[in-house]
Image (spheres, grey):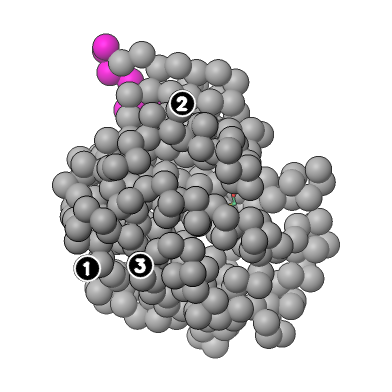
Amino acid sequence: MACEDAVIATNDDAAQCKRFAVEKGYWTDPYISQIIPKGFSTHAPEINRGYFARVRSIQILMEKFLKSTQCNCQIVNLGAGFDTTYWKLKDAALSPKSFVEVDFPPVTSRKCHFIKTKKALIEKISSEDDEIMVSKTEMHAADYHIVAANLKNIPELEKKLVTECHLDKDLPTLFLAECVLVYIETERSQQLIRWISDTFNTAFFINYEQVNMMDRFGQVMMDNLKTRDCYLHGVSACASLDTQMKRFTSNGWTSADSLEISTVYNCLPQAEIQRIERIEMMDERELMHQLFSHYCLTWAYRDLKDVGLAQIGLT
Ligand SMILES: C[S@@+](CC[C@H](N)C(=O)[O-])C[C@H]1O[C@@H](n2cnc3c(N)ncnc32)[C@H](O)[C@@H]1O
C-alpha cells in the first residue's frame, strides 16, 4: 500500500510544478490554482521549461485530434491527477463529446471535492438542465466524468468507461497518459494498450514519460524515487524511443512515433520558446539538455474510420 501511496503522491508533485510554472508565466491556466494549493518549494528553470514543453506539446497533439474529428470524439485521461484540460478546452470551444478522467480513489475523491466546492470549476460543468451525479470518488455529468479505477484492472476499467461513462467504442477516442505508465509493470501497461486497440476502432494515444533510462542519469532518478518508496515498475518500456514505439506497434496500433523532449522543444513555436526563455535566466544549458533527453513524447494511432489520424504530428 505504501507503494501505491507513493505513486499517488506523484500527482501532488506534478500539480505543484505546474502551478508554480503557471504563476511564473510559462503558460496560462486559470484553473490549476483552484485545484492545488500554493506550495512552498520553488523549481529550477529547466524544470519549468520541461513542464512547458510537456503541457504545450500534448496540447498541440490534442488540438489536432479535436480538429481532425471536428470534436465529434471522446478523450480519456488515464492517471489524470489534477489535470485541468477539460476546463481549458471548454474555454477554447474545443470540447469533445465526452471527457473522462481515471485515477486511484484517493486522487479522484480530492478532485471531486475541489470541483464541488469551487464555483469557477463547477459552473463550467453544469448547465441548467444537466444533472451532475457525484459520489465520494466519482462524478458523472453530460460531457465530463471522473472515475476511480486501477489501470491494471482491465475488467474494472472497461465497466467504468463503457458501462458507466457510456463511451462509444465507434467514436474516435484520444487516450492520454501523462507520466503514468512508467509506474505500471510493462506487461500490465501492454495489456491496457492492447485492450484499447481491441476495443476502440479509431483511437489516438499520447504518452509522455521517461526514456533512455538505462544510463547513469536514469539510475540516479530511480534511486531517488526509491527513497520515497516509489518504484518505476514500467521502466523496461522506457529504455529507448524504439521500446516506447514498439509497445504500441506490437499491441494492435497501426503506427507510432516518439521524440525526445529535447527534440520536441525545438519543434515548438519558436516565438513561444523565445518568450519563455526570457522568464528566467539559465546558466547551465547542459543540465536542461540532460533532463530533456530523459523524457519523451510518443503518439500512436489506429484509424479504421479514416478520420486523418495518420496526419497528426508535432510539426
Ligand atoms: C505523475 S502523476 C501525473 C498526473 C497527471 N497525469 C499529470 O501529468 O499532471 C501520476 C498519476 O497516475 C496515477 N496512477 C498511477 N498508476 C495508476 C494506476 N495503476 N491506476 C490509476 N491511476 C494511476 C497516480 O495516482 C497519479 O495521479
Q: Residue at x 67, y 82 (%)?
A: 214
The quarter holding residue 211 reads bottom right
User: Dot 2: few (<14), some (14–19), or many (≥20) neighbours within 10 Å?
Assistant: few
**Residue at the extreme bottom:** 286
Residue behind label 1 places its C-beta within 8 angstroms of ligand 1: no
- Determine the secondary structure under disc 2: helix
Report the span colored magenta: 121-129
Residue 164's label in the rendered image is 2
Q: Earlier in the sequence, mark 3 or mark 2?
A: 2
Real-space Cα separation, disc 1 to disc 3, in angstroms: 13 Å
Task: Tell me where residue 12 appears, x and y as whole percent.
Answer: 62, 47
The residue that appears at 48% across and 63% down in the rendered structure is 251
Label at residue 56: none
Q: Is 36 on the left-hand or right-hand side of 61?
A: right
Query: Which residue occupies 22% across, 53% down?
Result: 305
Q: Quadrant of the C terminus?
A: bottom left
Label 1: element kind:
helix
Q: Residue at x 49, y 69 (%)?
A: 250
Quadrant where the image shows the N terminus: top right
Q: Which mark is residue 254?
A: 3
* Percent coordinates x, y for residue 18 in the rendering: 50, 54
